[in-house]
């Protein structure tokens, strides 16, 4: 699975996201994992997108690179989540993410330095699959 990060200035819970996903026709499961609660949003009978809450106070932002921390410091999110997905599911996930941002605001960052590209409600339909972008950036760094 590949990770994206969702940040919003509003207080948003896994239950809020689950309700929105269910309204969009997805089956969901909120459960307790060893690291805390998680949400699986099933886009077919077996496969799912996984939402994991993260927070600065729990130390979850320590591993972010300098550019990413600067963006977070400027935005000052109230809620943050890792969204793990299979790259082939991007077209479906993109529609759900757009609904999430329409309802709760915020933005989606790629798992790259500085979160680039950043996906918003207004631009998510125009952006390529973030796993493609991450692969290109990795190739450029590795030379």
Image (cartoon, rainbow, N blue to C red):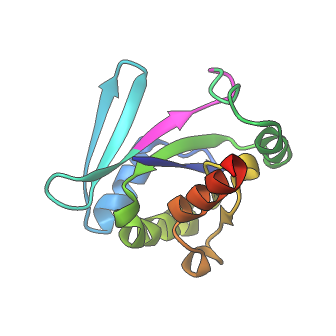
Which contiguous range is marked in magenta?
A: 51-58
User: Residue at (67%, 47%) from the top-left corner?
Assistant: 142
Of residues 82 and 14, the one drawn nearer to the viewer in this rendering? 82
* Horizontal side of residue 117 vs 129, given as left or right: right
Residue 135 appears anywhere in the view: yes
User: Residue at (23%, 53%) from the top-left corner?
Assistant: 47
User: Residue at (71%, 49%) from the top-left corner?
Assistant: 141
* Horizontal side of residue 12 vs 56, given as left or right: left
Residue furthest out toward the bottom: 126
Whether 110 is drawn above or below 95: the answer is above
How many numbered discs? Answer: 0
Quadrant position of residue 34: top left
Residue furthest out toward the left: 45
User: Residue at (48%, 42%) from the top-left corner?
Assistant: 13
Whether 136 is drawn above or below 123: the answer is above
Residue furthest out toward the front: 143
Residue 93 painted magenta: no
* Horizontal side of residue 116 vs 136, given as left or right: right
Residue 54 painted magenta: yes
- Residue 120 percent coordinates (x, y): 65, 68
Residue 9 appears anywhere in the view: no
């Amino acid at each position: 699975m590949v990770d994206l990060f969702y940040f919003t200035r509003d207080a948003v819970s896994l239950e809020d996201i689950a309700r929105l996903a269910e309204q969009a026709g997805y089956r969901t499961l909120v459960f307790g994992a060893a690291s805390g609660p998680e949400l699986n949003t099933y886009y077919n009978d077996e496969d799912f997108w996984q939402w994991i809450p993260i927070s600065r106070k729990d130390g979850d932002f320590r591993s972010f690179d300098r550019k990413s921390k600067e963006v977070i410091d400027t935005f000052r999110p109230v809620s943050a989540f890792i969204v793990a997905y299979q790259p082939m599911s991007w077209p479906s996930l993109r529609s759900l993410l757009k609904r999430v941002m329409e309802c709760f605001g915020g933005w989606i960052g790629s798992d790259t330095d500085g979160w680039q590209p950043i996906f918003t409600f207004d631009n998510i339909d125009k952006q390529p699959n973030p796993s493609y972008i991450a692969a290109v950036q990795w190739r450029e760094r590795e030379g």
